[in-house]
Image (cartoon, rainbow, N blue to C red):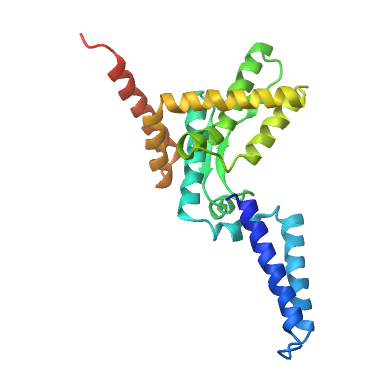
Amino acid sequence: MEKNDIGLNILAIGIFSITLLVLVGPLLSISPFIPATITFILLSLVTVDTLAWGNQGTNLFLNLFLSEEQKQRIIHHEAGHFLTAYLYEIPITGYTLTPWENMKINNLGSGGVMFDTSFLEEKGQDLRELNLLTERFAIVLMAGIAAEKLVYKNSEGGEEDNQKLSEIYKSLGINYSQIKIKQRLAILQAETLIEKYKDAYFALVEAMGKRLSVTECQAIIEEKKTSQLNELTPQN
């Protein structure tokens, strides 16, 4: 279940509870002022959260209702981003796995792997190189979805990733149908890459679950890569 689904369920429960309170209020001698006040407060909080906090309050609240499986799914999702970014030498500046961790570094949103994407904005670089870097970054963006599909056989996250991918390709003048093709291709390429380095991927999942630093996580990937290469290299 996605966070959006959890949010809708909680909202539906809240609306039902207030409606029920209004209906049974007269029987319990509850003033109609009470449900009206609760409704006003809730609407005010939602408005402030949406306009001033970028829904960060909602993210923090919904995070309280995540199951352990959903938390693990998030780690697997973000490890997909991290691994592919490292393999493509896209600078990783940090990662967070919960809205609380994100808030500590003054970021909005539910968390994720953070990259230095200045290479997409560099002026005067070769067009062929820019296209290659864009395609690689598209694979990195889709790697969270790919990782979930490999581990859980389906994907629940990735809405923000798809949106970022669309924004990048739209800025390059690519139409919607072509973007969808590039999206599917990027997912397949990410799946292949994660499968190829699955030992490094699962070691990374464990490391990120322990909140190891970016440098420590990168060292683990490199160690697993080297070990895999040695196993494939014929011994004299």
Give percent across and percent down for residue 212. Answer: 41, 43
Specify whether 174 is left or right of 205: right
Q: Say above or below: 103 vs 150.
A: below
Specify whether 88 is left or right of 132: left
Q: Quadrant of the C terminus?
A: top left
Specify whether 168 is left or right of 87: right
What residue do we see at 57% from left, 46% from top? 111
Give percent across and percent down for residue 57. Answer: 65, 59
Specify whether 221 is left or right of 93: left
Q: Say above or below: 77 vs 199.
A: below
Give percent across and percent down for residue 72. Answer: 46, 47
- Which residue reaches farthest top? 236
- Which residue reaches farthest left? 236
Q: Is residue 124 visible?
A: yes
What residue do we see at 53% from left, 56% from top? 66
Label count reads: 0
Q: Is residue 211 visible?
A: no
Residue nearest the viewer, comparing 235 with 177: 177
Query: Quarter of the image holding residue 218?
Result: top left
Residue nearest the viewer, comparing 208 with 22: 22
